[in-house]
Image (cartoon, rainbow, N blue to C red):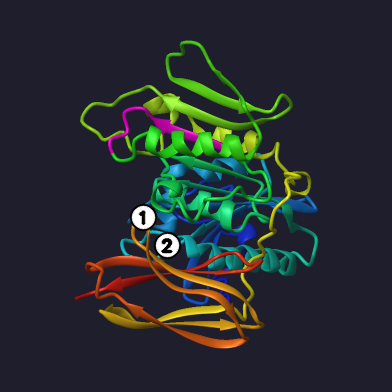
Amino acid sequence: MRSIVVTGLVLLMAVTAFGVPDYVAVGEGWVDNHYYRVEIPARTMTSASVPLIVVMHGGGGTAEGISGSSLMYLILEQEEAVLVYPQGHYYGDTWVPQDYLWIGEIVDQVSTDLAAQTEGLTTVDPTRVYACGSSAGGWMAHCLAYLDNDRYAAIATVSGGWPGNQFPQLLNTPPVNKVGFIAFHNRWDQVIDINYGSGSAALQWSEWNGAPNYSKTPFAPVYFLHNWDDGVKDWVKLHEIKTKINGTNNHVWPHNQTYGIEPVALMWPFFMQFDRSDLQSGDEGPVLTPANADLVLNTYPNPFNTMGTVTLTLPEADQVRVTVHNMLGQTVLTLADGSFNAGTQEFVLDGSSLASGVYFVRADVTGQAPLMQKVVLLK
């Protein structure tokens, strides 16, 4: 792992970037080949620990672009926080579930850098880490909350998708920890239907969070607020935006001047209600830990033509299931299902029965978060 902070956070106290207000300081870096942007207050932070928010762009977007379109940096005018914008790098600069691994590494690296460069005076609070995203970035926020469940206390999506539709086998059991969820979605969205995206997500998270009490605000000129609670805390909030702008697909990050709502202003206080230290669900079930660094999944060649090889390196003997899924999340091949010794195991990937396209190889190892790799079959 290698991190390059182009402009150190200490220097950033006096340096601002084009396109953001002067109270925002901007840095950037790399973890391996993954780029990220960082925004912090330009003033010296006085808090001993601060929250961190991962902000993810939609398909085809950029880290800088989502900073400008979301206005998440408005938080930094009054509050002390760290905003991290990872850059998606798959086809169309988008995301796949397995990205939770390197995004977590970026969060860890930024946390380490902040502590080092402030000489320990300000650190990232590991119990107050959150994620949000637009469109495909919202889709990825759900993946982070589910696959890296011990890290994120709450998430937010704007016009977001729901990975449970594409990968039902990926999200087929409740996560160990509860996660707060707030969503903003236009009922006239022509790219991701509200019911297919945020509506489906809200229903699932309300069930997982044990929040069966549903309420809906009466008639409102701008949006309906759908709310799920457990009698004590509001766990899930869905803002169904009613404003329609003709001639557009209404698939945008809305703002006050266009849609009459500012997600950032509602997102921040919602996040601050949640702290990872007190969000254990109490449910019995297997605890999934982030994948061991010595647990490695690889497919070659990639792309492959009919036949390929999948390798899985196990640090110790374990129960393993290796499957292949299509873009709908359906299992199309099972490569392995049983007990395997430590070391590198090889499995034949026979795509002769499959059509050309994008698939996902998934490895489930007892007690570990799933490993996934995107592969392309070209015949």
Residue position for label 2: 88
| Residue at x-position 64% and y-position 58% | 13
How far across and how far down the image is residue 161, in percent? 41, 44
Which range is magenta? 182-190
Q: Residue at x 62, y 85 (%)?
A: 341
Q: Residue at x 32, y 56 (%)?
A: 60
Question: Quick check: 50 left or right of 165?
Answer: right
Residue 312 to residue 78: above or below: below
Image height of 90 relative to 197, above or below? below
Count every numbered label the image shows and give the total.
2
Instruction: Identify the residue position indicated by label 1 in the image.
Output: 61
Label number found at residue 131 = none
Disc 1, SS = loop
Amino acid tagged 2: Gly
Residue 6, visible in the rendered structure: yes
- Magenta span has 258? no
Foreground residue among 131 and 2: 131
Residue 127: x, y in percent? 74, 52
- Is the Cβ of the residue at disc 1 closer than 8 Å to that at disc 2? yes
Q: Which of these two is toward me, 88 or 342?
A: 342
Q: Give the residue type at disc 1.
A: Gly
Task: Give the image quarter of residue 328.
Answer: bottom left
* Residue 1 showing in the rendered view: no
Q: Residues within 10 Å of mark 1 (few under 14, many from 20)?
A: some
Instruction: From the top left corner, tell me how far across and down residue 186 is, in percent.
Output: 38, 30
Name the element at disc 2: loop
In this picture, residue 61 sits left or right of residue 322: left
Mark closer to the observer (1, 2) = 2
Judge whether residue 188 is colored magenta. yes
